[in-house]
Image (cartoon, helix red, strand yellow):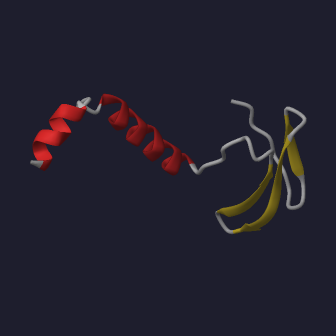
Amino acid sequence: MLVLTRKKDQSIVINDNIEITILDIQGDQVRVGISAPRSISIHRKEVYLEIQEENRKAAEARKISLEDILKKVD
């Protein structure tokens, strides 16, 4: 892990197309602004982990044939 120290209004650039700027610091909270291409997904880690878990569940879902669906409708 790379650890950097930044002050308010200072930035970090990643891969020429992502810029992370420190917007504000209040106590133990830091407001961060991220500029990146729309093609790059950006999520808070807890949201990212939830997405990954839902994707895993969806991938494990039992396949249902059309015949099975029609039987349940009748």
Q: Out of 64 and 61, give the one closest to the viewer.
A: 64
Q: Out of 62 and 54, give the one closest to the viewer.
A: 62
The residue depicted at 73 percent of the width and 41 percent of the height is 39
The residue depicted at 39 percent of the width and 39 percent of the height is 53
- Relative to residue 23, is residue 49 drawn left or right? left
The residue depicted at 38 percent of the width and 33 percent of the height is 56
In the image, is residue 74 above or below residue 17?
Answer: below
**In the orientation shown, which residue stands out farthest toward the bottom?**
26
In the image, is residue 48 above or below residue 9?
Answer: above
- Relative to residue 63, is residue 33 drawn left or right? right
**Image x and y of residue 30, in percent:** 70, 61
Q: Out of 68 and 2, give the one closest to the viewer.
A: 68
**Image x and y of residue 51, in percent:** 47, 44
The quarter of the displayed image where residue 72 is located: top left
Q: Out of 22 and 66, give the one closest to the viewer.
A: 66
**Image x and y of residue 63, in percent:** 26, 29
The quarter of the displayed image where residue 65 is located: top left
Looking at the rendered structure, the number of numbered marks drawn on it comes to 0
The residue depicted at 85 percent of the width and 32 percent of the height is 15
The quarter of the displayed image where residue 31 is located: bottom right
Quarter of the N terminus within the rendering: top right
